[in-house]
Image: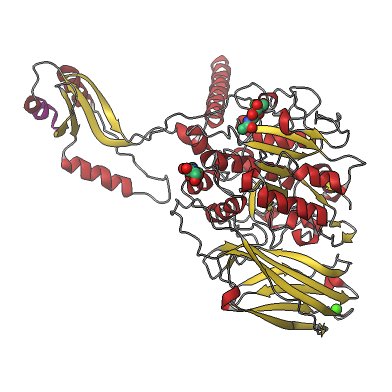
Amino acid sequence: MKLFTILIILFLVFSIVLTKQQEEKSRTRSPHLKEPTPTGELIVKLKEGITVEEFTEKTGLVLIKKLNFGSRNYLFKKTSLEFVEMVKAKGKGKGKGKGFQKPIFRIDSILKTHLEELVEHYEENRFYKPYLKTYEPSDSLFEDQFHLVNTGQFDGLEGFDVNVQPLWDEGIFGAGINLVIVDDGLYKDHDDLKGNYNPDLSYDYCNDITDPTGTIDDTHGTACAGMAGASGDDGACGVGIAPSVNLSGRRIICSGVTFSDMANSLGDEMTSVIDISSNSWGDFGCDIYGCSYVRVSNVLKEAIAEGVANGRNGKGIIYTFAGGNEGDYGGNVNHYSTNKLLEVITVAAVSNGGKHSHYSNIGTGILVSTISSGRNQKDEYITTRTTGSETSTSCDERFSGTSSATPLLAGGIALMLEKNSNLTSWDVQSILIESATFIDPPYKDNRWVTNNAGYKFSPNFGFGLFDANKAVQIAENWESLPQMQTFVTPIQNKIVDIPEDDKNGVNLHLTIETEDALTITGGVILYLSVEHSYIGDLDIKVISPHGTIAYVMDKNSNLQTKLDRHYFSIRTFYGENSKGTWTLNVRDYVPVDEGKILDWNLEFYGVNQEIPDVPEFEDRSLVYPELEEDESLASNSNCVSFLLMLISLFLFIIF
Ligand SMILES: *[C@@H]1O[C@H](CO)[C@@H](O)[C@H](O)[C@H]1NC(C)=O
Ligand SMILES: *[C@@H]1O[C@H](CO)[C@@H](O)[C@H](O)[C@H]1NC(C)=O
Ligand SMILES: [Ca+2]
Ligand SMILES: [Ca+2]
């Protein structure tokens, strides 16, 4: 009985130790800490007086070559027969990892005796993977930051991240780049931010003072700042994607702020030194009660156009904007205003499981996606671990949404600019498109379209997931595109009825002549006016002369508004030539409510040359696991907490 008890205790202790070790293992797992792969060879230093012949005779090893240094260093392998055995073993077994045998140089006891007798020292030869230095921030929450390095924590898909580690290893941290967070307050004294804080570009537009800290409730801007540029190795929280970027805050979320203040916050007399402006705010296009179209504010549009054309000494400020979090109510970036402008980079969110985040607005205006929360239909707040403004050390573990996806991209762009500060704002857009990773979770139709220039676009993801390493590598040798040109067609104002209850709808056409043609880079704008007793019936597509379809608007039972010279942004046609006949297709297949098209036209943003080729990169597309039942169900059971999340995660200005 006693023995039995002791055994049980021993077993328990043993399993605890084992679990601990396992934990330890998974905690420190990093792609760069893997054992280097053995080559199947042995490096030896023969003892003084031992000849190669003597050594090979006794050990049966075969000489490969003498090494260049010293006089007694050699490389050996086993006999070719044994090597064949080894290679065979390697090929056995099914599936990745299973039955795989590394070409380990087996050193049995006989060989061991010989070695001890004949050599001074020996070691197995291995493939060397050079990393000049690996940056692994020591910050306590870094290991939870799956968006930066996804090791599979929180059930995520290992490797599905923004691929920043190779850049950190090269020492690219965003130094010397000025990134402005336009938001609520920025708690500049936070331990995670103060080292990167730049007061020169900061301002509180609510109080007309230079300190952007704001009130204790202003946690959103602080979290955004941390996402982009929290410093590393400071003991505080986690780390931003660009841990050395210069951070400034512009406080505009408060009552009393006006359109002109907002416009000033996006660009002012300091525009020559602002590099990037990150904006995780928007207007309210949709909510649980329905959607309404919001007109683009002229003054905001102009401030941004000015920043892109003349900011950064003519290279253009790079604006990132959150796509918005109303995806569960049919939110589409084309419902909104500032965040769909072609001049800005509109960001969608995907989860750590590689899926479109359910709340993330879709639309042809989305440029790229980055990683945030939204696994399944559950409320998982786990995402960044950055900053909160309660004290100088508090961390925010519940920050997510397209609000967090946006500064993540903005910080990534800082890394691109550090590598090549000559990039224009439009160059950055092109490079993001060129470098984005195709993501196609098998759980639903992602409506990917491959356009005539070979680019893939989806209204869920834009051109795909942001890959910082690829973007920076392309940025390094990118030759700036020529000046962006625009071409706007005359307004087509023949009034046309939209056939009621008809699956085909009406097709309208316009033709671009050769002399007006551009290679589309910035995108296409559809301006459209419709008179209809229920706009939500409409389904709108634009089809290029090459047959590429852009899903501009889906039928949306929530939509109750007017379309009056409405601005729809379309990225789908990147790289196509605008020459030829374009088609606008408008359908209404709901047998109540009807209307007519009053006018429409298109505007093209492009250049007078082909888009340059970029190098091919390693394919980082995901292999998705089998569909799990709970992932396929669009459960609405968490509706209330969901709403709370949306409200807390995305800031809105109601115009
Ligand atoms: C970065 O911020 C510091 C202040 O913290 C400022 O002195 C410096 O000029 C900024 N760098 C650039 C490139 O503007
Ligand atoms: C940036 O442009 C300048 C002037 O044209 C040039 O000398 C420099 O090499 C460029 N830098 C990069 C990184 O391309
Ligand atoms: Ca930190
Ligand atoms: Ca109808």
* Residue at image point 90% right, 58% down: 289
> Residues in magenta?
55-61
- State whether residue 328 appears in this view: yes
> Where is ligand 1, by quadrant?
top right
Q: How many marks?
A: 0
Q: Horizontal and vertical percent for residue 530?
A: 84, 75
Above or below, 253 relative to 348: above
Would you identify the image quadrant in which residue 278 lies? top right
Is residue 647 at least partly visible in the picture?
A: no
- From this view, report whether residue 317 is shown above or below residue 19: below
Question: Is the image coloured rainbow, by chain, by secondary structure, or in one colour?
Answer: secondary structure
Q: Residue 142, how many percent across, how many down? A: 62, 30
Question: Residue 362 appears at what percent x and percent y?
Answer: 72, 59
Residue 60 lies within the magenta run: yes
Considering the image in quadrants, where does the N terminus appear? top right
**Along the horizontal axis of the image, is 566 left or right of 478?**
right
The image shows residue 34 at horizontal and vertical percentages of 43, 33
Tell me if residue 437 comes above or below residue 600 in the rendering.
above
Nearest the viewer among 214 and 3 is 214
Foreground pick, 32 / 25:
32
Question: As rendered, which of 161 and 622 lies closer to the eye?
Answer: 161
Q: Residue at x 42, y 32 (%)?
A: 131
Q: Between residue 243 and residue 602, name the one nearer to us.
A: 602
